[in-house]
Image (cartoon, rainbow, N blue to C red):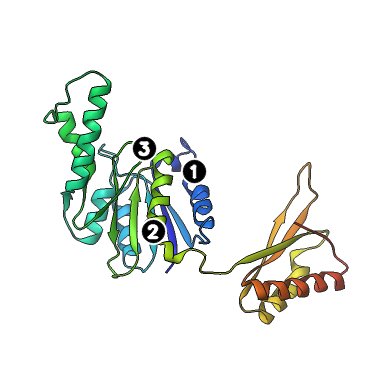
Amino acid sequence: MAIGLIIIGDEILSGKRIDKHFARGIEILAARGMQLGWAEYLGDNPERITATLKRTLASDDIVFSFGGIGATPDDHTRQCAAVALGVPLVLHPQAKTLIEERIVEMARASNQDPRLDAPENQHRLKMGEFPQGADIIPNPYNKIPGFSIANASGTGAHHFVPGFPVMAHPMMEWVLDTLYPQLFHQIAWQEKSVFVYGSMESTLTPLMEAVETAFPLVKVFSLPSVGDAQTRRHIELGVKGEPSQVAQAWEQLLAGLDRLSAEYRPV
């Protein structure tokens, strides 16, 4: 089981809006001792969204999908999820109640009559049409819910939230805290790294390979940088993984750098 993010919207792919879900999603998971396994960006293309959801719904993964669950012509996520699962869209009764409560609140705030049978308000109810069998995700910002559906594999689930960060991120936190607290802090993890100056990755590769061979629960990474006004050209070289092995791998890594007479400092 991995945790994945699907981030949907032409406006993100075109650069009209800057994605805020990826970075914040990592932070939300990290606060609970969890890690992101994968992420995908999609435009507002129904065929591609459906194909992606068919693939991910067949997995055991826990997936958060951001965007496209509104009721305008460029919102396709609800419909694509239903097609991917082979079930109809149905108006969720609890979603209907919450949307109607929101309509009444908005009308009263504007000193207007909350006509629930008005065409525009009937159209708003489409935001509560979810794949048959879905559960709702409460929205603390404006009550318009998201929804969760079980994966076709029988394990894992997909959780669909709006594209607006002010709504989506609290909803993601609610899902994790309500449905998955048993998964928090289950994997011990540690990371250590140094900035290495004046060395080439090809020179460091044998050392990296030796460390990974000696410690199978550790990954060795290298991140070259051309430097900037504050930092010289360098390679961030480090180890990450199971803490007890990280400690031993760290010692071996530093000893190897010393043998190479490499210039380095801890990050």
CA gap between label 1 and label 3 equals 17 Å
Task: Identify the residue at horizontal 60%, vertical 67% (top origin).
Answer: 189
| Quadrant hosting residue 54 | bottom left
Residue 267, placed above or below residue 100: below
| Residue marked by disc 1 | 20
Q: Secondary structure at mark 1?
A: loop
Disc 3 designates what residue? Answer: 141
The spot of residue 218 in percent (x, y) is 63, 73
- The residue under the point 69% across, 81% down is 214
Residue 190 quadrant: bottom right
How far is the residue under mark 1 from the one under mark 2?
Answer: 17 Å
Nearer to us in this view, 228 or 152: 152
- Residues under numbered marks 1 and 3 in contact, where contact means CB atoms less than 8 Å apart: no
CA distance for labels 3 and 2: 22 Å
Q: Are marks 3 and 2 in contact (CB under 8 Å)?
A: no
Disc number placed over residue 78 in the picture, else none? none
Q: Is residue 208 visible?
A: yes
The x, y position of residue 151, in whole percent, is 30, 64
Residue drawn at x 36%, y 45% is: 67
Query: In this figure, which residue is indicated by the disc labeled 2?
Result: 63
Quadrant housing the N terminus: bottom left
Determine contact: label 1, label 2, CB under 8 Å.
Answer: no
Q: Secondary structure at mark 2?
A: strand
* Whole-percent x, y for residue 201 in the image: 74, 65
Which comes sooner in the sequence, label 1 or label 2? 1
In this image, 59 relative to 193: left or right?
A: left
Q: Amino acid at mark 2?
A: Val
